[in-house]
Image (spheres, rainbow, N blue to C red):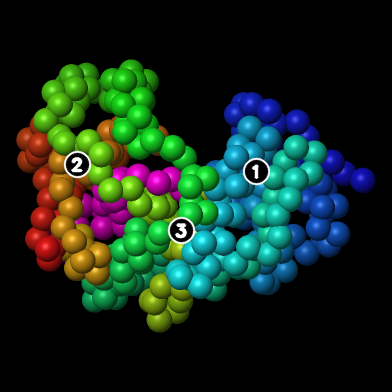
């Protein structure tokens, strides 16, 4: 009987391939119609045509609780996978869930017309609004327990973090003063996807949204934290698309707060962002906030 290998550290988990885990996966499921997906930070497998299995190595075991809880709370509220069963084997967590129809918005994007994209944006904004309006005691298991403490912790290491990613010193030097001018204290706390991007949204052949997935990094915190990924990887600097997304969301966003949370985000990498986003008109963080999130100011109150 195949077993799962040790993966107690990020390095050990990162060294494993999805193919190498297949014998343990087929043993776990008792079936061999299992095919690895190529995308995603954790090992994920198609199981037949209708199911998906996600694995959580021991080093990421807590993410199973987060994702399962989010799916249990959101099923019937948003188009998310339905959890079928979950458990643990050899220290690994696993979650079997239903498979969403369609293809990712990232895959579909090049084939969508400008009009298709414009029609889609308010629907995506509506999905985020629905998510942020959910109030369920079960979500108290989500991190962080104190958003203000989380922000303070991220801020304490923000300069070192961006230097490690290779961000130019001219940008790094602006970060402390910029954050000093942005009010981030005690916002309303809402459920967050944290990686609301084209890769995690499914659409059908008609361009309609068929689902949202990948909730293992979900948190509870300030709503603008979700607009980090939405601005970077959904509207991607297109002001018209962002305005339409905010029309569906029903509230404006503060561009400077969005940039602040982008700087403080757990997975922040501005070296990458500068490669894929439009350049600001001048090399300042205020100009950057306007260039990437400024159009959100035009949303309805």
Mark 1 vs mark 3: give the one in front. Answer: 3
Q: Earlier in the sequence, mark 3 or mark 2?
A: 3
Where residue 111 appears, x then y in whole percent? 36, 70
In the picture provided, is 121 more to the left or to the right than 164?
Answer: left
Name the residue beneath numbered marker 3. 136
Mark 3 vs mark 2: give the one in front. Answer: 3
The reply to whether the C-beta atoms of the residues labelled 3 and 2 are less than 8 Å apart is no
Residue 140 is covered by the magenta coloring: no
Name the residue beneath numbered marker 1. 56
Name the residue beneath numbered marker 2. 257
Residue 235 is covered by the magenta coloring: yes
Residue at 55% x, 48% y is 66
Q: CA distance from mark 1 to mark 3?
A: 24 Å
Is 51 in front, or is 207?
Answer: 51
Question: What secondary structure is marked by label 3?
Answer: loop
Task: Please determine whether, in this image, residue 51 is positioned above or below residue 179.
Answer: below
Q: CA distance from mark 3 to mark 2?
A: 26 Å
Count of marks overlaid on the render: 3
Q: Which residues are magenta?
A: 217-240
Task: Please determine whether, in this image, residue 294 is positioned above or below residue 79.
Answer: above
Residue at 52% x, 45% y is 141
Where residue 245 appears, x then y in whole percent? 24, 64
Question: What secondary structure is marked by label 2?
Answer: helix
The reply to whether residue 15 is in sight is: no
Residue that sits furthest to the left in the current view: 282
> Residue 242 is drawn in which quadrant?
bottom left
Where residue 133 appears, x then y in whole percent? 34, 62
Where residue 20 appears, x then y in whole percent? 75, 42
In the picture provided, is 161 more to the left or to the right than 141?
Answer: left
> Residue 268 is drawn in which quadrant?
top left
């Amino acid at each position: 009987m195949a077993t799962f290998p040790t993966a107690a550290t990020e390095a050990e988990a990162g060294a494993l391939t999805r193919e190498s885990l297949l014998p343990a996966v087929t043993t776990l499921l008792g079936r061999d119609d299992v095919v690895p997906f190529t995308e995603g930070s954790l090992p994920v497998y198609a199981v037949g045509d209708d199911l998906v299995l996600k694995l959580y190595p021991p080093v990421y075991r807590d993410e199973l609780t987060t994702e399962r809880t989010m799916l249990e709370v959101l099923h019937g509220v948003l188009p998310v996978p339905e959890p079928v069963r979950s458990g643990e084997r050899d220290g690994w967590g696993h979650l079997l869930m239903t498979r969403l129809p369609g293809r990712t918005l990232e895959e579909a994007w090049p084939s969508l017309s400008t009009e298709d994209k414009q029609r889609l944006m308010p629907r995506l904004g509506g999905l985020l609004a629905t998510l942020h309006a959910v109030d369920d005691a079960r979500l108290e298991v989500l991190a962080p327990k104190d958003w203000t403490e989380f922000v303070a912790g991220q801020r304490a290491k923000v300069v070192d973090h961006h230097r490690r990613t290779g961000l130019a010193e001219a940008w790094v030097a602006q970060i402390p003063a910029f954050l000093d001018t942005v009010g981030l204290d005690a916002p309303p706390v809402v459920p967050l996807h944290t990686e609301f991007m084209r890769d995690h949204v499914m659409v059908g052949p008609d361009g309609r949204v068929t689902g949202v997935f990948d909730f293992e990094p979900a948190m509870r915190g300030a709503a603008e934290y979700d607009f980090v990924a939405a601005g970077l990887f959904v509207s991607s600097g297109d002001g018209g698309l962002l305005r339409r997304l905010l029309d569906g969301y029903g509230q404006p966003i503060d561009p400077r707060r969005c940039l602040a949370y982008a700087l403080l985000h757990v997975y922040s990498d501005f070296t990458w962002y500068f490669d894929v986003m439009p350049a600001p008109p001048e090399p300042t963080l205020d100009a950057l906030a306007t260039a990437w999130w400024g159009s959100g100011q035009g949303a309805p109150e």
